[in-house]
Amino acid sequence: MKNLIFIAPPAAGKGTISEMIENRFHLPHISTGDLLRDEIAHMTKLGLEIKDTMARGEFVSDEVITKLLKKRLSSKDVKKGYILDGYPRNINQAKEYDKLLEELSFDMGKVIYLVIDKETATKRALSRVVCKSCGASYNLSNPDLSPVREGICDHCNNELSVRSDDNKETFKTRFDTYMKETYPLIEYYKEKNNLIEIDASKSPNEIFEEIKKVIK
Ligand code: AMP
């Protein structure tokens, strides 16, 4: 089983790298942010409850997110491994995840820590556009990461848009919340001896090369 978890500040490139791994290794990319955005897009009861919280850049409750993840990890397609992007995001979720792995008899796998400074992450967030249909992410400040046709997704031809939480003020909240809640996970996984640090200021291709070695 090949399981990877990404821990990184918002806009470090988790989504882009996860997509590259998904395509090359055929491992499903499970993004808890995407699972939640999906609930909002479909205007489910949960979607309506979490919409404002997400727009403010705050976390949704551990209970809600763990339940959604548990449901996703019960699908058949994760049996050979998966890429987990956006979970766990605090120590309580990490402990819940440990329990979940035990329950499902899944391997812990490797935890990839993408290291990036606040200024670079902010710049990336403010030039990011995403496809609401397939979840693909683009960066308009980098020609290599821009869509071929302006405003149109290369993968599914749907319209691209700016995420409602990718504005300067909300991004600051998300980054500060990351430092307070998520950053302590680095120590948690260092102690478990399965943390791999990668410099996320490099290009996606360079990062992908390093991750390929981890997977192989
Ligand atoms: P992301 O797409 O990973 O940047 O997540 C976008 C937003 O979804 C976050 O700012 C949170 O509001 C919410 N979210 C995603 N994953 C989690 C999680 N594990 N725990 C709490 N909130 C989450």
Image: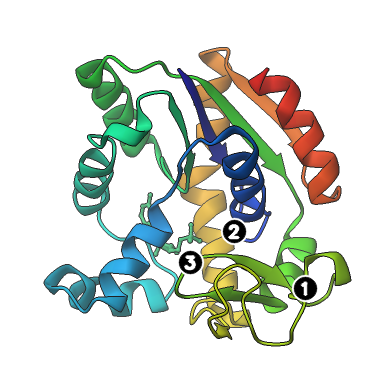
- Mark-to-mark CA distance, 2 and 1: 19 Å
When the figure is inspected, residue 101 is found, relative to residue 175, above or below; the finding is: above
Q: Residue at x 49, y 58 (%)?
A: 177
Q: Report the Cα–Cα distance between label 1 and label 3.
A: 16 Å
Image-based side of 145 in relation to 36, left or right: right
Identify the mark at residue 23; answer none if there is no mark: none
Quadrant in which residue 15 is drawn: bottom right
Q: x, y percentage for residue 33? A: 42, 59
Determine whether label 1 and label 3 are within 8 Å by CB.
Answer: no
Question: Rounded to the nearest whole Å, what is the CA distance between mark 2 and mark 3?
Answer: 19 Å
Residue 124 vs residue 165: left or right?
right
Q: Is residue 144 left or right of residue 51?
A: right
Residue 50: x and y, percent? 25, 71
The residue to which callout 2 is attached is 10
User: Mark 1 or 3 closer to N-term?
Assistant: 3
Would you call the spot at circle 1 few (<14 residues within 10 Å), some (14-19), or many (20 or more)?
many
Residue occupying the far left of the picture:
45
Q: Earlier in the sequence, mark 2 or mark 3?
A: 2
Q: Comparing marks 2 and 1, which lies closer to the viewer? A: 1
Q: Classify 29 as above or below 127.
A: above
Q: Is mark 2 within 8 Å of ligand 1?
A: yes
Q: Where, quadrant-wise, is the C terminus in this rendering?
A: top right
Disc 1, SS: loop
Q: Earlier in the sequence, mark 2 or mark 1?
A: 2
Q: Pointer 3: what residue? A: 134
On residue 146, which mark appears?
1
Q: Amino acid at mark 3?
A: Cys
Q: Determine contact: label 2, label 3, CB under 8 Å.
A: no
Q: Provide residue 108's location: percent of width, then percent of height.
A: 43, 19
